[in-house]
Amino acid sequence: MLVKEWMATDVVTVDENASMMKATQIMKEHKIRRIPVVRRGKVVGIITDRDLKEAAPSKATSLDVHELYYLLSEIKVKDIMTPNPITIREDDTVERAAVIMLENRISGLPVVNDEGYVVGIITQTDVFKVLISITGIYRGPIQIAFDLEDRPGSINEVAAVIRQHGGRLVSILTSYDHAEPGRREVYIRIKDIEEGALKEMIERLKTRFKVLYVVRDDISSIPKKADVATKDVFGGIRQATA
């Protein structure tokens, strides 16, 4: 999955020569915490609400309100931004973006094209959406986890048994992180089926394979705020999807 398919394109940016006061106003207006700083449309830095707070005069300052406003209007974004931020290309994978965010402990990345112009933002929220999409939880509430031999055909054998009992596969994911050498953990999500049929299927699977667990996810009880706007780390306001 490519970044350009999941990123937000309604990006809020600020010019490097804008005042600190202007950056503060933009953050308040769009209810965001970080803004990519641009020079003629190309990313040259990142400014955060923390940067603004640290650069702002102390509450104990002796400056009067006019002097304070003058000072805030004179401090430029480029003077307090973090220069040369980490970016990602629109044709990179979401997995690569996730690794960059994890390894650098950041929650979002400006997306740039081959010319270096800002074309989007991808955040942890977008990564969560990708996770939900590839697992297929909205389409299949039942997940069955297996500890299988790491050999060709092992997953096909499991899938064949599931199909024989009327199960319809939604997604298949594998992981080696917690498996012993020569084995892998496989997570298969299927469409909902009648409880009796599910029990019979699981009993059959257990006779041939190592079943780690079976979970029926009930997401109907999860609170939803479909019409409430959610904040991105860098870019504007985006509507939450139910």
Image (cartoon, helix red, strand yellow):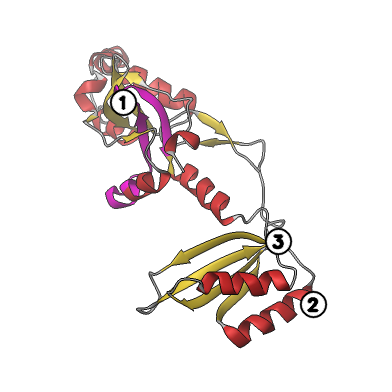
Q: Position of residue 98 (x, y in %)?
A: 38, 48
What secondary structure is found at the residue carrying circle 3? loop
Spatial CA distance of label 2 from label 3 is 14 Å
Which of the marked residues, 2 or 1, is nearer the chain's N terminus? 1
- The total of numbered circles placed on residues is 3
Tell me the amino acid under the disc marked 1. Answer: Asp
**Residue 168: image x %, image y %?**
70, 62
Q: Residues within 10 Å of mark 3 (few under 14, many from 20)?
A: some
**Would residue 52 be seen by someone viewing this image from the given angle?**
no
Residue 13: quarter of image: top left
Pick whichever of labels 3 and 1 is earlier in the sequence.
1
Residue at position x 48%, y 77% from top?
Answer: 148
The answer to whether any part of residue 166 appears in the image is yes
Q: CA distance from mark 2 to mark 1?
A: 55 Å
Viewer-proximal residue among 66 and 92: 92
Q: Which residues are magenta?
A: 100-122
Task: Determine whether the residue tagged by mark 2 lies in a helix, strand or loop.
Answer: helix
On residue 114, the disc is 1
**Residue identifier under label 3:** 191
Label 1 element class? loop
Question: Which residue lies at the image location 63% right of the left edge and 81% below the top edge?
Answer: 205
Q: In the rendered view, does 188 fall on the left or right side of 166?
A: left
Residue 64 place in picture, x, y as percent: 28, 17
Residue extending farthest to the bottom is 207
Q: Is residue 171 magenta?
A: no
Q: Amino acid at mark 2?
A: Gly
Query: Circle 2 is placed at which residue position?
Result: 196
- Residue 107 belongs to the span the image colors magenta: yes
Q: Is residue 229 above or below residue 186?
A: above
